[in-house]
């Protein structure tokens, strides 16, 4: 299925004029924070994107349409819906749209939408989609609840460069280090944009991952391990695992993880915007 998103006016204008656009997922808005707090997080991330000179294109399925660029009222719907919003990956877009459900896109779902309308978006990654999408995903690395070495090996197998933002090791979401070595360290947004431009020239539509260490880092490994154990004991599986673990981490950390999440989401959005602006300027200058 080819998904043709409904673009907000400013998003369409930026894409038409070769401007910088940053796509943002909506699962963080609905599933990432308790009590509707995702709305403030989403608005802060969009504000950081604008402050860096790019246009935010938050993606979600609303009233039967896949939308890129949401209004404040639409973002509030996702935050209010919480986990009752459908979690939408690439495979779920068609059903969600046809059934008129409120669909919060994962990174993979967001990437699937982006493939059809842009070639240089910076967003936050589902590995198979990233491997076939010309995008740079900016994140705080891999969640330590995953098999991080296996994740790094799969990224290498898929031909996805893992760049470290001023760090030689893949961050572990809450922790600044601890992961396997990255394939290259980058020191500036311009350098990251130039690497992406040359990578796409040499490798077509393969994506890249830019891993930014959280600032400040917080040691939650014991809490995460306890949360993972409890979720396993409850028999939770599939897509429900991550939100269940994160909810417990929020509870067990006394809210510390929520504040760290707020900061890293906004910081990642700002970095994505800086790279997008640099890439847009380089394309206008004839980078190859």
Image (cartoon, rainbow, N blue to C red):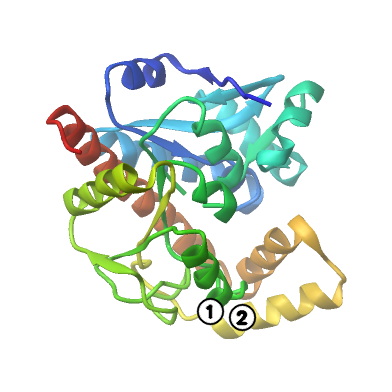
Task: Compare residues 110 and 264 and report the one nearer the observer.
Answer: 110
Where is residue 272 shown, x and y percent of the image?
33, 46
Residue 100, compared with residue 183, is above or below; it is: above
- In the displayed structure, 105 sits above or below 194; it is above
- Residue 165 visible, this angle: yes
Residue 55, x across and y down, in percent: 34, 29
Point 48% across, 46% down: residue: 41
**Mark 1 burial class by Cα count in 10 Å: few <14, some 14-19, many 20+:** some
Direction front: furthest residue: 202
Kindly identify the residue that appears in the image at 44 percent across and 78 percent down.
Answer: 179
Q: Is residue 143 above or below residue 261?
A: below
| Residue labelled with disc 2 | 223
Tell me if 169 is positioned left or right of 224 in this view: left
Picture quadrant of residue 127: bottom right
Residue 178 on image: x %, y %? 43, 82
Residue 19's quadrant in the figure? top left
* Quadrant in which the N terminus appears: top right
In the image, 7: left or right of 227?
left
Residue annotated with mark 1:
220
User: Could you give the CA–CA distance between mark 2 and mark 1, rounded to whole angstroms?
Assistant: 5 Å
Disc number placed over residue 201 in the picture, else none: none
The quadrant in which the C terminus is found is top left
């Amino acid at each position: 299925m080819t998904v043709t998103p409904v673009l907000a006016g400013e998003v369409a204008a930026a894409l038409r004029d070769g401007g910088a656009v940053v796509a943002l997922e909506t699962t963080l808005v609905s599933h990432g924070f308790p009590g509707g707090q995702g709305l403030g997080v989403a608005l802060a991330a969009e504000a950081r994107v604008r402050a860096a000179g790019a246009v935010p294109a938050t993606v979600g399925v609303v009233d039967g349409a896949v939308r890129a660029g949401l209004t404040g009222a639409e973002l509030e719907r996702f935050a209010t819906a919480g986990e009752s919003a459908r979690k939408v990956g690439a495979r779920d877009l068609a059903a969600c749209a046809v059934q008129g459900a409120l669909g919060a896109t994962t990174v993979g779902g967001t990437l699937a939408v982006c493939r059809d309308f842009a070639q240089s978006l910076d967003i936050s990654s589902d590995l198979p989609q990233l491997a076939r999408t010309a995008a740079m995903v900016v994140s705080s690395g891999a969640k330590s609840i995953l098999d991080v070495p296996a994740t790094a090996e799969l990224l290498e197998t898929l031909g996805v460069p893992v760049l470290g933002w001023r760090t030689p090791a893949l961050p572990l979401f809450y922790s600044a280090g601890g992961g396997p070595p990255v394939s290259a360290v980058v020191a500036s947004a311009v350098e990251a944009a130039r690497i992406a431009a040359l990578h796409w020239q040499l490798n077509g539509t393969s994506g890249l991952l830019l891993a930014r260490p959280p600032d400040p880092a917080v040691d939650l490994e014991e809490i995460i391990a306890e949360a993972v154990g409890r979720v396993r004991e409850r028999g939770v599986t599939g897509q429900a695992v991550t939100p269940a673990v994160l909810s417990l981490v929020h509870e067990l950390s006394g809210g510390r993880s929520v504040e760290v999440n707020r900061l890293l989401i906004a910081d990642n959005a700002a970095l994505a915007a800086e790279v997008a602006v640099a890439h847009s300027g380089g394309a206008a200058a004839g980078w190859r």
